Every structure is written in C-alpha cells, then in structure tokens.
Image (cartoon, rainbow, N blue to C red):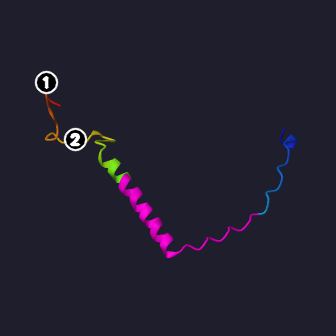
Amino acid sequence: MGFLKPKTPPLPPVQAAPEAPEVSDEEKEQIRKDKAAVERRRKGRRSTILTGPLGIQEDQEDATNTLLGKE
C-alpha cells in the first residue's frame, strides 16, 4: 500500500561554509609542534608492542631462558 506513505518534507536550503579564521605564524608553529609531540608519543607506544596480526614478532635470539628451556 504505497499510496498511504506520508510524503517527506523538502530539505532546508544548504548554507555556505563559514570562512576559516586567520592563523598567525606563531600559532601555526605551535600547532606543528603539538602534532609532532603527539606523533612521538604514539610512535613510542607502538614500538613497545611485540605482537601483530601474525602473532608474536619476537626473534629466537630475543627469547629468554626459563627453568623449562627457551620460550
């Protein structure tokens, strides 16, 4: 019974995007430094993870000796 569906109202008109604010050179430099610091921290955490999609990515030489042998 397709004739009983309510009609959707027309979409409102699209507004133009606001203009981007002016950014000074000092602010651009500070933004660049902040992004670099975030990337350093992210890379630091990633380097401590030893597993990946294929499992543990540790070399045989890196394996530690235990009482039962090498892990």
* Looking at the image, residue 65 lies above or below residue 30: above
Q: Which residues are magenta?
A: 14-41
Look at mark 2 in the image and give the residue it sits on: 58
Q: Give whichever of discs 2 and 1 has the lower sequence position.
A: 2
Out of 45 and 70, give the one closest to the viewer: 45
User: Mark 1 Cα within 10 Å, few/some/many (few <14, many 20+)?
Assistant: few
User: Mark 2 Cα within 10 Å, few/some/many (few <14, many 20+)?
Assistant: few
- In the picture as drawn, the residue positioned furthest to the top comes out as 68
Look at mark 1 in the image and give the residue it sits on: 68
Q: Main secondary structure of the magenta part?
A: helix
In this rendering, position of residue 60 left or right of residue 54 = left
Q: Quadrant of residue 18?
A: bottom right
Q: Which mark is residue 18?
A: none
In this rendering, position of residue 18 left or right of residue 53 = right
Out of 49 and 58, give the one closest to the viewer: 49
Instruction: Look at label 1 and name its amino acid.
Output: Leu
> Alpha-carbon distance for marks 2 and 1?
19 Å
User: Residue at left 36%, top 56%?
Assistant: 40
Q: Position of residue 43 (x, y in %)?
A: 34, 53
Instruction: Look at label 2 and name its amino acid.
Output: Glu
Q: In which quadrant is the C terminus drawn?
A: top left
User: Residue at left 74%, top 65%?
Assistant: 15
- Reply yes or no: does residue 32 show up in magenta: yes
Out of 13 and 68, give the one closest to the viewer: 68
- Reply yes or no: does residue 34 show up in magenta: yes
Q: Secondary structure at mark 1?
A: loop
Q: Position of residue 20 (x, y in %)?
A: 62, 70
- In the picture as drawn, the residue positioned furthest to the right comes out as 4
Q: Position of residue 61 (x, y in %)?
A: 13, 41
In this rendering, position of residue 65 left or right of residue 42 = left
User: Residue at left 46%, top 67%?
Assistant: 30
